[in-house]
Image: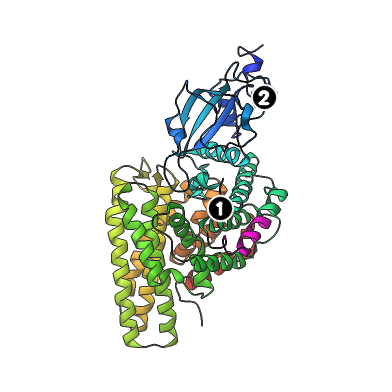
Amino acid sequence: MSGTRISKRCDLCRTRKIKCDQNWPICGTCRRANKPCSGPQGFYSRFIPSENSSGSPPPSERLAEGDVVSQLPSEKSTATDTKQSSLVVLRTRPAVSGRGKYLVLRPQAGSSRTPSPTAPPCTREDRLASRLVQCIDAGAGSDRDIRLRVTWIDLAVSRLRSSPVLYEATNLFLSSWTSFHSDPRANLYIDRAAYVKALRTLNAALSDPTQSRTVETLAATALVHRVEFDYEMRRNINESHHSNGLSALMMRKGPPRIDDDLDVRLCFENIHVLLSHFILGREDIFFTRPEWLKAIKDAVQKNATKGDRIWDRYDLSIHMILWSDLVKDLRALNDNHNALLAQRLIAKTREIDRGLCGFEATHIARLWEEGHIWEVRNPKTGYLLTYGFDDCVYCEIYHQHAMVSIAVNRILQAALDIIGSEESLTIETRIFEYSDRIWKMLPYIEGMSRTVRDNFIAPFVMSLESASTEFRHHLAKKMIDISGPRAQLLGDHPEDQLIVMSKALTGREAS
């Protein structure tokens, strides 16, 4: 018999017949299994968000160990609550993500003739919020961090109660994420019942004029899009169809409100999702419109002093938007070889390139100085083998900066060739240096989980032109390994197709 009494174990520990460390609200066994912990029988394990949708702290922040409450701050009383029992707060613990507080509660002895401890005082939204924050906490600081795939997911916690459409989409995403990490080799990760329910709720919200333009509906749309792209392995996803729907919803809603963190973060994440779709499909890039560009720059400026590494990546997103604008100008120049248009494009491209150099001199140089990026060299020869990173976000910043720099310099090179400049060779050297950076990050990226590695495919595509024929074949094979099952759609000569894509992403496609 284990040292802890059976009645004090959580459900999972009792099922496995092992000792429970009682580190509630999440015991060690449940944390390692990435499962919600039931807590001991007769006790409530409860999560309460740290802020409501307006951003103000709720009364739960004042709760401390030993307090007695008859109703938790996040619950609504009804006329039938006359026999509600009092609860004693046994333990409190803030979530690692900072998005809420865990409470361990017990019915107070003698407070009610029928305390019914088997019916936890929480709604389905509260239970989902608790599961989500537990998942965030369990993966924090590793490549299993759910926020590496959906960076704004922690901001959805406080809105689940008020938005059925966001609740259903979050439930679908969380169940798919959990299924994938339970068995990455499986072919089915999506709970079909949850999927159908999320789609039905989303369609109803999009048809309702009062909900179709809300941030919560946009967030739900982005989550369903992410689930289908990441976890639907049995059929080919119509990426263009999804992207068109997402961009139409964003245009209908308008630029993000600077005072709404979820709205702002959604905008930046959708830039990364939609930009290649806009460029390859020659779609209208509404991010370049003055009102959108102003809102995006204002958001970066407002949050630049927070010290949050994600805002370094969002600052880089501005350069990605400007890159897409250069592609449009180069295509116009290819249709009409006008020397004046070429000179204007060259001047515009050089200005953006100076901005990228400034980003490297400030943001990236700081990452080197603080030890978030380092070199890994051969101890015998001193040859640079690869780069090391504190975590995936720093790698993504370094990777994407090199990608955007390659794209901007390719466009500059094409414009200079049109006017017959001899500067092309110098620019090619710079492009090779940025490409070499991307290649040397490959060992680090290969060690990540598949859903995280997907974030790094585009930079490898942009670097492919600089490689030798033999190395191109090697890189293409590596990209297929990183991409997973859908990469098989590329055919027998993937490197040729990827180079065609690289040229199209810089406006240099064959007419």
Q: Left or right of 115: which side holds 265?
A: left
Reply yes or no: does residue 118 show up in magenta: no
Amino acid marked by disc 1? Ile
In terms of depth relative to the viewer, which is nearer, 214 or 432?
214
In terms of depth relative to the viewer, which is nearer, 404 or 312?
312
At x 34% / y 66%, what residue is drawn? 429
SS of the residue under disc 2: loop
Q: Left or right of 77: which side holds 389?
A: left
At x 52% / y 59%, what residue is drawn? 214
Q: Is residue 495 above or below residue 394?
A: below
The residue beneath circle 2 is: 116
From mark 1 to mark 2, how far is it between C-alphas? 51 Å
Residue 477: horizontal and vertical position, in percent?
56, 57
For label 2, count other residues whose C-alpha is less than 10 Å away and answer few (under 14), some (14-19) or many (20+): few
Residue 414: horizontal and vertical position, in percent?
39, 77
The image quadrant that residue 369 belongs to is top left
Residue 405 visible from this viewpoint: no
For label 1, count other residues whose C-alpha is less than 10 Å away and answer few (under 14), some (14-19) or many (20+): many
Q: Left or right of 390: which side holds 206?
A: right
Which stretch did the figure color magenta? 199-212
The residue beneath circle 1 is: 482
Q: Left or right of 193: which side holds 466?
A: left
In terms of depth relative to the viewer, which is nearer, 323 or 76?
76
Reply yes or no: does residue 210 show up in magenta: yes
